[in-house]
Image (cartoon, rainbow, N blue to C red):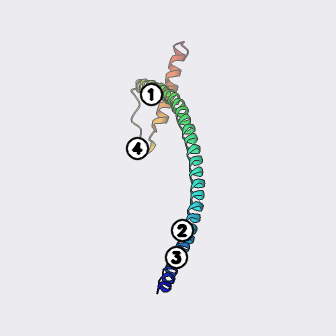
Amino acid sequence: MNHSLGIAIETLVAALLVITIGYCMLLNTRLKRLKADEHSLKATIAELITATEIAERAIGGLKHTVRDVNEHLGSQLAAANQMAEHLRKQLAEGDNVVRRLSKIAIAARPAADAPEPVAAKVTPAKALAEAAQAFSERRRSNGLAA
């Protein structure tokens, strides 16, 4: 009986050793996969760091470009505002000239002129041109240059 108990214990120990060896092989394959994943993860992290550095440089360049554009746009806006003010003044002066020419044209018409028939209407541009012509002739007849 001693021999059978010894063989049973030895068989049990051998079975446990076989199970342990099998489990160690399983753990070894898992560790190899984990190492491979670690290398690929390190490569991914390195690529991410490189991409982050490139993005940071691009953001710096964009900030510089925005600053330059802002300065350039500011000077262009100031010039545009000056030009708009100049044009507004010129338009006001043009309005004044047109009003004076209209008054001169009205004053230059002889009182004996009858109103024109409806069929022969004169456009405002023609009336203005005629008024200017009458004004220049009147100034010349007085000896003044127009």
Q: Is residue 98 left or right of residue 48?
A: left
- Is label 1 in a helix, a strand or a loop? helix
- Foreground label between 1 and 3: 3
Q: Are marks 2 and 3 in contact (CB under 8 Å)?
A: no
Q: Which residue is at the far front?
A: 2
Comparing 97 with 24, the one in front is: 24
Which amino acid type is shown beneath numbered disc 1?
Arg
Closest to the camera, between mark 2 and mark 3, is 3
Nearest to the eye among marks 2 and 4: give it. 2
Residue at point 55%, 32% (across, down) = 68
- Near-viewer residue (69 or 10): 10
- The residue lying toward the viewer, choosing from 138 and 81, is 81
| Dot placed on the residue nearer the N-terminal end, 2 or 3 | 3
Tell me the kind of residue under disc 3. Ile
User: Considering depth in this image, is 67 or 23 the residue closer to the camera?
Assistant: 23
Callout 2 environment at 10 Å: few (<14), some (14 to 19), or many (20+)?
few
Real-space CA distance between mark 1 and mark 3, rounded to the nearest whole angstrom: 98 Å
Q: Secondary structure at mark 3?
A: helix
Looking at the image, which residue is at 56% across and 36% down? 65
Q: Comparing marks 4 and 3, which lies closer to the viewer?
A: 3
Residue identifier under label 1: 88
Q: Are marks 2 and 4 in contact (CB under 8 Å)?
A: no
**Kind of residue at badge 2:** Leu
Query: In the rendering, at what x and y percent does residue 116 appear?
Result: 41, 38
